[in-house]
Image (cartoon, coloured by chain):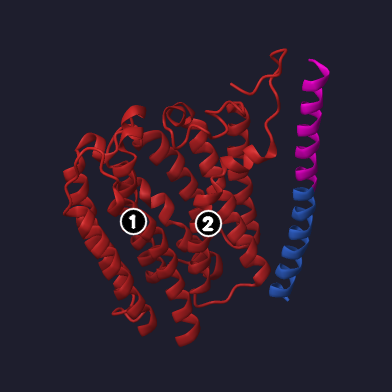
Amino acid sequence: MDPQDEKIVRERQHARAKVMAWLLGAFVILVFAISIAKMQLAG
Amino acid sequence: MTTMTTSSVPLPAEWRDFLALTKPKVMRLVVFAGLAGMLVAPEPINPVLGFTAILCIALGAGAAGALNQWYEADLDAKMKRTAARPLPAGRMDRQSALHFGVGLAFFSVILMELATNMVAAGVLALSILFYVFIYTVWLKRRTPQNIVIGGAAGAFPPVIGWAAATGNISLLPVLLFAIIFLWTPPHFWALSLFVKTDYANAGVPMLPVVAGERVTRQQIGLYTLPMAAAALAPWPLGLTGWLYGVAAIALNGMFALLAARVALRQTAPGDAMKPEKRLFAFSILYLFLLLGALVVDHWVLG
């Protein structure tokens, strides 16, 4: 793999990792909010 | 096939290509239909749980879209309209699309069950399975009735939205299902009339390809009648107020007018197909406005 290709691969991996991190963060917040909502409904 | 580097090493797909697999444009109508079903339900839903339910409907639709593109990559490559999608364009390998679709499908159904209830999760799972196995795998390449039966897959969202709020299914969501189910054939056949060559080249047995334009035009006219009946039914049945009734009469009148123009027309080679394109564009607006009127009616008149 030449340096140009390697740069493209790294860029794409970096962009995908960043999107995945944001999605996981959003999922954690969503699960927290669902838990609170469920507790309110139960109580 | 995927995009290759100069040394023939496959490049990883971009995140935008995964997003494109979910057919975001189609998802807008699906989300709106689900939201309408939820908002007209008699029991209010907690906003966080309601948001999660709509998210799950969107993710489920995205999963179905991804699995559809995984299975149909060969067909998509033969059609101008779909040739630029990530798989036929070679920007992603098929296995990534399959894993993404299956993962997203499981995730959406499990999250729906955790946030709302088993009925909503069950109907969501059914809609994904119906779209992938009944429509994509079984019907699409075999029969011109593909979108008639397959249309059921796209008709589930208001039922899911209603079920997420109430935990059950009653007459109004069944009628909403019927409206979208009966709306699908005239909507898709209007499209297939002006992309007929694309479907013929790909070997997809759409009605204009198999039975010809005249039969397709007749069928568009015929399906408009039960669709309009289903759309008007909630008002006389006392499930909605006059606001929805008036909107339904106006929208179905307009739909019938445009459908009649298409149904009674004969075309010569090289025709610009303007009435067909107008019917297709209006059919999308029709569903948005009809469901919007239902929600407004519910809020204003209770």
* Mark 1 to mark 2 CA distance (whole Å): 20 Å
Label 1: chain letter: B
Circles 1 and 2 on the same subunit: yes
Among the two numbered marks 1 and 2 on one chain, the one whose residue lies closer to the N terminus: 2
Classified by dominant secondary structure, the portion drawn in magenta counts as helix
> Residue B84: x percent and y percent?
53, 33
User: Disc 2 residue type?
Assistant: Arg
Front-most of residues B34 and B285: B285
Quarter assignment of residue A14 = top right
Quick check: B171 above or below B205? below
Question: Does any portion of residue B160 appear in the rendered image?
Answer: yes
Q: Which residue is mark 1?
A: B278
* Residue drawn at x 24%, y 39% as measured from the top left: B208
> Residue B276: x percent and y percent?
29, 51
Chain A image colour: blue
Residue B117 inside the magenta-drawn segment? no
> Residue A18: x percent and y percent?
80, 43
Total labels: the figure holds 2
Q: Secondary structure at mark 1?
A: helix
First to last magenta residue range? A1-21
Quadrant, the N terminus of chain B: top right
Quarter assignment of residue B10 = top right
Label 2: chain letter: B
Front-most of residues B8 and B95: B8
Quick check: B59 above or below B288? above
Image disc number at residue B28: 2
> Residue A4: x percent and y percent?
80, 21
Task: Say few, some or many: other residues with alpha carbon within 10 Å of mark 1 (under 14 / 14 to 19 / 20 or more).
Answer: some
Chain B image colour: red
Front-most of residues B2 and B112: B2
User: Disc 1 residue type?
Assistant: Arg
Residue sitting farthest toward the top: B7
